[in-house]
Amino acid sequence: TCVDSGPKALAFLEETLPDLMILDIIMPDMDGIDVCRRVRHDTRFTALPILFLTAKGSTDDIVDGLDAGADDYVVKPFEVAELRARVQALLRRGMCSRESSSVLQLNDLTLDSETYQVSVNGERVQLTSTEHRLLRYFMEHPNQALSLSHLLQAVWEYPETTGDPDLVRAHVRNLRAKIEKDPENPQIVLTVRGVGYKTGMGE
């Protein structure tokens, strides 16, 4: 289904829950960033995969899109095969997320895969679908140094050499903002210089 404005996209969501939403940023009446934020603020669409497909390809544009709650960001012009691979990965992830209903505990973190909420020292925080998958993977592999390419394959389920490492960095930053007491000095998701990230828990 294709609509040609932000308000029409939001109206469509009131009628139908799609398997995936692909957004441009430059749209009439309401841009894609605003649409994405509004969708993510509605708990009905927590698990809805959102991908930006846009000509706006600066680092700031990509950061804005991911900060708004998008799961992935593809810049025009693009290779159809790569877009197809990313869409298929997002759809697979959505199916796996809906099938998972377990609660995972690691030290002071409790992650509920049914609600995509994490409890940090007793305070509940809402995560997006991608933040949930990323944190779950960290919690399932405590103290393992995980490279950006490994995380793109394991969490995003992208084929090797597909996907942008900046996706991982942006989602880690957003995750830290939600679960770290001091995001500038993280204690849960640590940077391993020259490699990627690891959890600082479970030792």
Image (cartoon, rainbow, N blue to C red):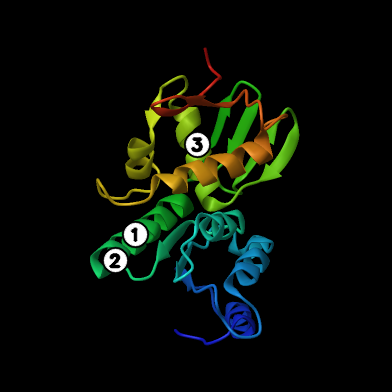
Residue 15 placement: quadrant:
bottom right
Q: Nearer the viewer, mark 3 or mark 2?
A: 2
**Can residue 191 be seen in the rendering of this structure?**
yes
Q: Nearer the viewer, mark 3 or mark 1?
A: 1
Contact check, label 1 and label 2, Cβ < 8 Å: yes
Give the side of residue 20 with respect to residue 17, left or right: left
Residue 89 spot, x, y in % from top left = 34, 56
Badge 3 crowding class, 10 Å Cα cut-off, few under 14, some 14 to 19, many 20 or more, is many
Q: Residue placed at 48% from the left, 61% from the top? A: 49
Mark 3, secondary structure of its residue? helix
Q: Residue placed at 44% from the left, 71% from the top? A: 55
Residue 11 spot, x, y in % from top left = 63, 83
Label 1 and label 2: CA atoms lie apart by 5 Å
Mark 1, secondary structure of its residue? helix
Residue 84 image label: 2
Tell me the quadrant of the picture where the N terminus can be found. bottom left
Q: Which residue is the site of mark 3?
A: 136
Kind of residue indicated by mark 1: Arg
- Going from N to C along the chain, the mark reached first, 3 or 2, is 2
Q: Which residue is the site of mark 1?
A: 86
Give the side of residue 48 with respect to residue 120, left or right: left
Kind of residue indicated by mark 3: Arg
Q: Residue placed at 52% from the left, 63% from the top? A: 48
**Can residue 101 be seen in the rendering of this structure?**
no
Badge 1 crowding class, 10 Å Cα cut-off, few under 14, some 14 to 19, many 20 or more, is many
Residue 173 spot, x, y in % from top left = 58, 41
Residue 33 placement: quadrant:
bottom right
Residue found farthest to the right: 123
Residue 135 spot, x, y in % from top left = 52, 37
Kind of residue indicated by mark 2: Arg
Badge 2 crowding class, 10 Å Cα cut-off, few under 14, some 14 to 19, many 20 or more, is few
